[in-house]
Every structure is written in structure tokens, then in C-alpha cells.
């Protein structure tokens, strides 16, 4: 006797050889869906049909942030030359021409022991660099240096501390000749994570040494018309709240001391938009560094191209605008692309245009 064919079930997916659409939760438990959302974002899962558009809208991840309204901000675009392969693959002129072609208003130059701006660079040679920048159609948004780390004002070795002061005095000279008022300064550290063999410096000692160094530099900076802009740093155990940084700057009662605010350096535990109202008019210059709170390890490789992170840029820009900041926004990045490095420069310029309302 022939066995009757079973009646097709309502959820039978075999229809003319095609798969019948089925809800994501018929096979995937909610916990797994939430894990996918945390890893990839709701918008992406919705495009794959794993969740509905309504469920994607409930995802609090940055991928679901609505497009910010277009508002024009009167701030200027700058980029630090660390984002370019200088001097290993590109000359200073090539870097500057690329930055101009990409649409930047200014560049932040770096003072080092080798290159175009060093302790051995003569006054005339520094002026030549300044003329080259202006001739290409850019401005020097500020002067920056990695040398504040190995020759820290708060180092345990007194010879290192003295060398740090000497270098800082020469940076003031260099900034004046470059015709920029902005010199980034790292006040000090209780600990440097990439130097695990160096003993930590007690907080009171660090604070005392940092203040002594700034007091020695202030007369030189005041005479040169240079602003010593103290940067907020990550993982250095010093000046880790906006209140501490503001009080440190105010304690000198000098127009030659301000803040170089870095959005990324405090991104692991803080939100830059909450620092800005407290620092207010003390902010003389700004580093824009993108970071992601989804990355637990915090080091120089944590930073990423603009807009590829978790920073609430509309809130940051609005906070800067509200305190009256009209200066440079400088993209700082430490890993220039090994191939087609110009791609990062053009991407950054385009991102800044959109952030500043220059491009919709």
C-alpha cells in the first residue's frame, strides 16, 4: 500500500526549488543576535536580513547614529606630518604640496633630532621652511615634538631633565621663526608604559618638576610671543582630568601657558565633549585623534582614521564652537599608509570638510 505524501507545513522552505524567507530568530537565539550586533552593528545585520530595520534602529552602536545636521564651523583644517611618510619616503616640500592639494589650511610641523627642524637648524634655515610653507599656500598651525618623552621634564635623570629644558627653549626659538604661536608641551609623566624598566615617579615629585620646568620656560615664551600649550596625555598618570589640567594652567597666571587639547588621548575612559566646556578659553590648539572604545588595549595603534571610531564628533565640534574656539583642528596619526599614503591625507581632508560643514 502506498504511503500518502505528507501535507506541506506552513514553514516548509521548499517552494519551487527556492528558499522561503524565514525570521532570523527561528534558528538564531537572541543572545547570539545580540553578539552579532555588538560585533558588526545593527545596520549591517539588517542589510543581511538577520534582523529587521526596526530592531536595527534600537541598536545604540555608533553605526546607528543619525546623520548630523549640516552646520558650518569657523575652524581651520590642519594635519600633522606624522601622518605622512616624512622624511623616509617624501621630502618636506612633497608633503606640503600634497597637503595643499588635498585642501588643508595648515600643517603642524615636528621638531626632531634629524630632519628639517632640529637643534642644529639655523635661524635662516627655519625661516626658509616658513617661507616654503607660505609659498605653497599653507600656514604652520603649530610645532610638535616627540622629544618631550625621552627628555621629559619629570625624568628621574637630572641630565635628561636639563636636556629637555634646553630642547624646549630651542623649540620656542623655532616656533617664533616659523611664525606660529603654538608650541605643544608635555608637562611630564609619573609612568611611561612603553618603558617598563623605568621606575615610576611619585606624583608629588612629578608635579613639582613639571611646575619648575614651566616656570623656567615662561619668561622665554613670553618674550618670544609663544604659547606653551600643555597637552592632555593618555597613560602618563598626570593631569588626567579637565579640572586638574585647568588648575595646572591657571596656577602660572601667564598668557604664555594654555592647553593643547587632544580628543583621542583620553578616549579610553573619558569623552572629549565633556572636557571642552571645562577647559574653555584655555584651549589654544586641538589635535583630532579618532579612537574606538571597542578596543581594550590603548596604545598608538589604537588610533584610526577620522570617522572610523566611536567619537561623537558632532558633540565635540559643538562644544568647541560653544567655547569660542576658532583655531586649527589638526589630525594627528602615527601610522602613514605604506602604500598610496596620499589616500589617508585626502580622506582626512574630506572628513574634515564634512565635519566642518564645508561639504554636504
Image (cartoon, rainbow, N blue to C red):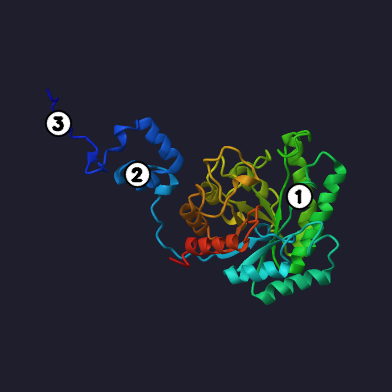
Instruction: Tell me where residue 177 appears, x and y as whole percent.
Output: 77, 68
Could you tell me if the residues under marks 2 and 1 are in contact, i.e. CB atoms within 8 Å? no
Instruction: Quickly name the residue at label 1.
Output: 148
Mark 1 Cα shell of 10 Å, populated few (<14), some (14-19), many (≥20): many
Element at badge 1? helix
What number is the disc on residue 56?
2
Q: Nearer the viewer, mark 2 or mark 1?
A: 2
Left or right for 16, reference 252: left
Name the residue: 80% across, 41% down: 155
Instruction: Tell me where residue 162 appears, x and y as whole percent.
Output: 85, 48
Instruction: Tell me where residue 41 appears, x and y as whole percent.
Output: 42, 43
Q: Quadrant of residue 172?
A: bottom right
What number is the disc on residue 7?
3
- Image quarter in which the N terminus is found: top left
Q: Nearer the viewer, mark 1 or mark 3?
A: 3
Name the residue: 34% across, 41% down: 50
Q: Nearer the viewer, mark 2 or mark 3?
A: 3
Left or right for 313, reference 3: right
Element at badge 3? loop
Q: CA distance from mark 1 to mark 3?
A: 78 Å
Amino acid at each position: 500500500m502506498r504511503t500518502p505524501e505528507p501535507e506541506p507545513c506552513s514553514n516548509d522552505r521548499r517552494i519551487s526549488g527556492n528558499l522561503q524567507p524565514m525570521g532570523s530568530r527561528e534558528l538564531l537565539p537572541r543572545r547570539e543576535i545580540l553578539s552579532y550586533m555588538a560585533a558588526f552593528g545593527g545596520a549591517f545585520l539588517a542589510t543581511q536580513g538577520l534582523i529587521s530595520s526596526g530592531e536595527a534602529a534600537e541598536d545604540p552602536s555608533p553605526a546607528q547614529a543619525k546623520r548630523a545636521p549640516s552646520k558650518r564651523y569657523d575652524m581651520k583644517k590642519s594635519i600633522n606630518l606624522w601622518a605622512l611618510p616624512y622624511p623616509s619616503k617624501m621630502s618636506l616640500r612633497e608633503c606640503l604640496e600634497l597637503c595643499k592639494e588635498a585642501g588643508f589650511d595648515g600643517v603642524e610641523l615636528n621638531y626632531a633630532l634629524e630632519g628639517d627642524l632640529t637643534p642644529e637648524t639655523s635661524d635662516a634655515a627655519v625661516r626658509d621652511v616658513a617661507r616654503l610653507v607660505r609659498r605653497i599656500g599653507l600656514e604652520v598651525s603649530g610645532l610638535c615634538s616627540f622629544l618631550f618623552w625621552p627628555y621629559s621634564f619629570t625624568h628621574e635623570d637630572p641630565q635628561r631633565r636639563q636636556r629637555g629644558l634646553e630642547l624646549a627653549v630651542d623649540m620656542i626659538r623655532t616656533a617664533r621663526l616659523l611664525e606660529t604661536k603654538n608650541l605643544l608641551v608635555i608637562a611630564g609623566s609619573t609612568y611611561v608604559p612603553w618603558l617598563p624598566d623605568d621606575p615610576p615617579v611619585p606624583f608629588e615629585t612629578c608635579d613639582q618638576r613639571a611646575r619648575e620646568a614651566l616656570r623656567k620656560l615662561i619668561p622665554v615664551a613670553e618674550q618670544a610671543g609663544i604659547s606653551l600649550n600643555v597637552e592632555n596625555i593618555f597613560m602618563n598618570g598626570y593631569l588626567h582630568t579637565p579640572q586638574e589640567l585647568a588648575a595646572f594652567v591657571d596656577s602660572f597666571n601667564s598668557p604664555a601657558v594654555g592647553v593643547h587639547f587632544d580628543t583621542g588621548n583620553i578616549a579610553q575612559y573619558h569623552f572629549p565633549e565633556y572636557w571642552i566646556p571645562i577647559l574653555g578659553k584655555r584651549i589654544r590648539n586641538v589635535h583630532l585623534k579618532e579612537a574606538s572604545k571597542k578596543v581594550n588595549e590603548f596604545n598608538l595603534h589604537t588610533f584610526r582614521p577620522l570617522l572610523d571610531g566611536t567619537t561623537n564628533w558632532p558633540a565635540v565640534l559643538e562644544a568647541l564652537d560653544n567655547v569660542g574656539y576658532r583655531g586649527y583642528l589638526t589630525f594627528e596619526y602615527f601610522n602613514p599608509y605604506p602604500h598610496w599614503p596620499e589616500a589617508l591625507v585626502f580622506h582626512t581632508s574630506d572628513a574634515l570638510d564634512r565635519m566642518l560643514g564645508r561639504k554636504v
